[in-house]
Image (cartoon, rainbow, N blue to C red):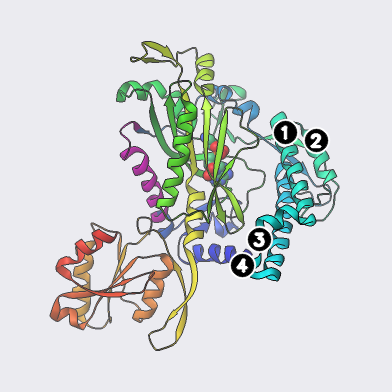
């Protein structure tokens, strides 16, 4: 798995998806730039989300709020006081860690031990193996499962109570050592606020202190009435937004999984108080469907209920994706109650109530939120699509290829137009004409360099669903050969019907 992840990262750089930020200065930790193919894929992800949220729901409208907000926003939202991670330093290596992540890593090791036992038994017993019965009865599996459950509940309680002492005690009790130095010489656990701050104009000190938003959601909350009134929406309705968010993550690792500057796609759905659990279940199911529509399955997606709820939520679930380093949070669905609107009402002194014409009364709506990181979705998409495989080489043997089996709607390039050879003006002219005809409708690429096989491989590597080859016969029959990326099937398609052919498939 480690190798697979390394290969994906290296593929991203080679094929212009992602580069380390300011690489010539040795990069800036946990910050990345999206290259020519990366920006296309990222835009396609955002478009797929926007379409499914805003275009397909008459009662969801969009917003693009500023990153900077009045500093009181973050006091009201609880981020100034409660948006903290528990951090701990190892005195020997001087490395800093998130205390909860150290415990989670310990739990992951227990899970791996359980899995190892199960795999061993599966091998030994073959087809007769009953995994459920084995997990319920094998003493080693049971002992590790018990340890895992004890750590899980203890961590959840410590996180909910903000009990830093017990978190330190957990690290001692579970004999967790620094991954770098192997030492168990730890400092106390301290709270660390994740918001980046900066200064407004020339205003000095606390007065001019501004924060870079750690979530896009607050821009939606403070605009709730502006949007509702101007778009004449009635509860239940939603506001969707895509934008940058910033968090001073203590440990930012695993490539674009945890970054300090990232992008979120968030939707706040305003509902009548008391109906929030119904909507929570609705959005939980809807969001999973979206992931499935883009190629997800029960193999790589699962729900995970939160053990410790954020300060604003009364229910929360993650949609987890099986990244190359294990199942991790991809998207969160949170029932945020009326916490945010009530807090903004209290601190701003402005009413945040909605007059419900059906009930003939005013109330502060409850909110169900769906929140997903664009970058995390990007990594999930690439991890799912990245495939190393052997394919027939057309000469009776086989050859290796790396192909991105991307959903066509997400592919950075939809079709590549390739003249069979470069040094034939008739072919290149015809191929260019095909390209010119398609380029306004589809992200298309014209490529005449290298042998056709190499050009196919280049397109496979960036996930282009269709390669369109203009050959000598094309000059006679006005048709082209269309090669499909995953099945490698080739079809002869008349140029008159090419657009319709692509439209149907893309
Ligand atoms: N408004 C709610 C909220 O921000 P969250 O669970 O903290 O909730 C939502 O974040 C989503 O944003 C996550 O599921 C993840 O996809 C993404 N995300 C959060 N922190 C991130 C980071 N440091 N780097 C990349 N994506 C991140």
The residue shown at (37%, 23%) is: 235
Q: Percent position (x, y) of residue 477?
A: 14, 78
Image-quadrant location for residue 243: top left
Residue 44 in magenta stretch = yes
N-terminal of the pair, mark 2 or mark 3, is: 3
Res 166 label: 2
Whether residue 68 can be seen here: no
Q: Could you classify mark 2 by the number of other residues whose Cα lies within 10 Å: few (under 14), some (14-19), or many (20 or more)? A: some
Measure the alpha-carbon separation of dots 3 and 1.
34 Å
Front-lying residue, 479 or 277: 277
What residue range appears in magenta? 40-60
Residue that mark 3 sits on = 130
Q: Secondary structure at mark 3?
A: loop
Residue that mark 1 sits on = 157
Measure the alpha-carbon separation of dots 1 and 2.
9 Å
Contact, CB < 8 Å: mark 3 with mark 1?
no
Whether residue 237 can be seen here: yes
Residue that mark 4 sits on = 3
């Amino acid at each position: 798995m480690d190798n697979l992840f390394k290969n994906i990262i290296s593929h991203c750089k080679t094929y212009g998806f992602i580069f380390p930020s300011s690489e010539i200065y040795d990069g800036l930790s946990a910050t990345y730039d999206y290259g020519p193919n990366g920006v296309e894929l990222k835009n396609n992800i955002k478009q797929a989300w926007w379409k499914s949220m805003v275009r397909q729901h008459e009662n969801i409208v969009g917003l693009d709020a500023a990153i900077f907000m009045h500093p009181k926003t973050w006091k009201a939202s609880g981020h100034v006081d409660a948006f903290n991670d528990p951090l701990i330093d190892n005195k020997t290596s001087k490395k800093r860690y998130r205390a909860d992540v150290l415990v989670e890593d310990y739990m992951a090791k227990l899970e791996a031990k359980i899995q190892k036992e199960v795999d061993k038994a599966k091998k030994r017993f073959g087809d007769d193996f009953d995994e459920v019965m084995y997990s319920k009865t094998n003493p080693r599996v049971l002992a590790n499962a018990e340890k895992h459950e004890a750590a899980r509940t203890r961590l959840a309680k410590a996180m909910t109570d903000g009990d830093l002492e017990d978190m330190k005690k957990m690290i001692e009790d579970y004999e967790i050592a620094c991954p770098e130095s192997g030492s168990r010489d730890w400092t106390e656990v301290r709270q660390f606020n994740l918001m980046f701050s900066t200064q407004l104009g020339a205003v000095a000190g606390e007065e001019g202190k501004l924060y870079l938003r750690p979530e896009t959601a607050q821009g939606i909350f403070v605009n709730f009435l502006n949007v509702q009134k101007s778009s004449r929406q009635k509860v239940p309705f939603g506001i969707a937004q895509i934008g940058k968010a910033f968090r001073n993550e203590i440990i930012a690792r695993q490539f674009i999984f945890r970054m300090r500057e990232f992008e979120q796609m968030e939707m706040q759905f305003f509902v009548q108080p008391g109906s929030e659990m119904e909507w929570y279940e609705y959005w939980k199911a809807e969001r999973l469907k979206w992931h499935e529509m883009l190629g997800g399955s029960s193999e790589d997606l699962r729900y995970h209920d939160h053990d410790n709820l954020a300060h604003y939520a009364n229910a929360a679930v993650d949609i987890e994706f099986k990244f190359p380093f294990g199942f991790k949070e991809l998207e969160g669905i949170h029932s945020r109650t009326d916490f945010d609107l009530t807090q903004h009402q209290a601190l701003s002194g402005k009413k945040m109530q909605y007059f419900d014409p059906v009930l003939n009364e005013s109330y502060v709506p409850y909110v169900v939120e769906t929140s997903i990181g664009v970058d995390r979705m990007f990594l999930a998409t690439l991890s799912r699509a990245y495939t190393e495989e052997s394919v027939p080489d057309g000469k009776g043997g086989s050859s290796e290829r790396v192909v991105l089996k991307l959903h066509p709607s997400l592919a950075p390039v939809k079709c590549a137009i390739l003249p069979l050879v470069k040094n034939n003006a008739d072919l290149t002219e015809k191929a260019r004409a095909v390209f010119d005809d398609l380029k306004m409708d589809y992200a298309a690429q014209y490529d005449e360099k290298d042998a056709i096989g190499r050009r196919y491989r280049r397109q496979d590597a960036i996930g282009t669903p269709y390669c369109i080859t203009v050959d000598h016969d094309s000059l006679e029959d006005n048709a082209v050969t269309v090669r499909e990326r995953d099945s490698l099937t080739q079809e002869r398609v008349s140029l008159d019907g090419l657009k319709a052919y692509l439209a149907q498939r893309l």
